[in-house]
């Protein structure tokens, strides 16, 4: 796979606008561990290798465990996530797959049990933002850095 273009170089002002939204979401008060779980899960759904690589590394830097990262793709069957995290992950899936799910009422109701209205907006913006980043990375074929030994 070969990168198509570097959006940061070609349209820096546009990327700056998305980066500002990213900064707002990062500072919204949502837990750093939750933010990285949501970003990783959405990136898994979208098949964004660049973002999966980035956000699993970021999650580890924030103290996330290998086990929770490995089990994220099967979070419903894994007993290592809190009820709040489960609600966020279900919402992440529903919003990421919005054309299929239409954000079901039961998923929304579960989110609202664990998140305030403001947190629900911030969580939804988090999901929207990572989906935007995924679409940029996938569309322009961003390639995750690969260690030479692992690539061989």
Image: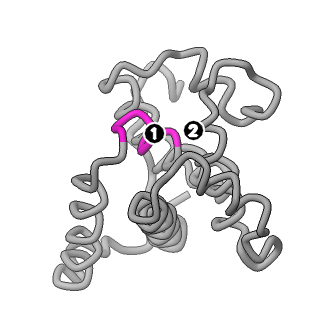
Tell me if residue 91 comes above or below residue 35 in the rendering: below
Residue at image coords 61%, 49%? 113
Residue stretch rendered in magenta on the structure: 31-37
Q: Secondary structure of the magenta portion, mostly?
A: helix
Tell me if residue 16 comes above or below residue 27 in the rendering: below
| Left or right of 149, for residue 11 | left
| Left or right of 6, for residue 77 | right
Q: Is residue 3 something one can see in this rendering?
A: no
User: Dot 1: within a 10 Å radius of its alpha carbon, few (fewer than 14), some, or many (20 or more) residues?
Assistant: some
**Residue at which label 2 appears:** 84
149 or 22, which lies in front?
A: 22
**Residue at which label 1 appears:** 34
| Left or right of 76, for residue 135 | left
92 or 117, which lies in front?
A: 117
Residue 83 horizontal/vertical position (percent)? 64, 33
Tell me, yes or no, whether the highlighted magenta stretch contains residue 36.
Answer: yes
How far, Cα to Cα, is label 1 from label 2? 9 Å
- Numbered disc 2: secondary structure: helix
Tell me if residue 148 comes above or below residue 144 in the rendering: above
Residue at image coords 49%, 49%? 39
Residue at image coords 64%, 46%? 87
Asked if labels 2 and 1 touch by Cβ distance under 8 angstroms, the answer is: yes
User: Dot 2: within a 10 Å radius of its alpha carbon, few (fewer than 14), some, or many (20 or more) residues?
Assistant: some
Q: Is residue 152 something one can see in this rendering?
A: yes
Residue 14 horizontal/vertical position (percent)? 25, 84
Quarter location, residue 94: bottom right
- Numbered disc 1: secondary structure: helix
Residue 93 horizontal/vertical position (percent)? 69, 57
Residue 130 horizontal/vertical position (percent)? 46, 61
Tell me, yes or no, whether the highlighted magenta stretch contains residue 40.
Answer: no
């Amino acid at each position: 796979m070969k990168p198509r273009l570097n959006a940061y170089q070609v349209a820096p002002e546009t990327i700056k606008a998305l980066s500002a939204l990213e900064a707002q979401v990062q500072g919204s008060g949502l837990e750093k561990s939750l933010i990285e779980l949501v970003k990783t899960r959405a990136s898994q759904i979208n098949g964004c290798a660049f973002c999966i690589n980035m956000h699993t590394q970021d999650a580890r830097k924030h103290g996330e465990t290998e086990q929770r990262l490995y089990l994220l793709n099967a979070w419903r069957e894994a007993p290592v996530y809190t009820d709040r995290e489960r609600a966020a992950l279900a919402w992440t899936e529903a919003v990421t797959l919005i054309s299929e799910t239409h954000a079901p009422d039961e998923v929304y109701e579960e989110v609202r049990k664990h998140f305030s209205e403001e947190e629900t907006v911030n969580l939804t913006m988090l999901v929207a933002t990572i989906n935007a980043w995924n679409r940029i990375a996938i569309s322009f074929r961003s390639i995750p850095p690969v260690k030479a030994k692992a690539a061989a």
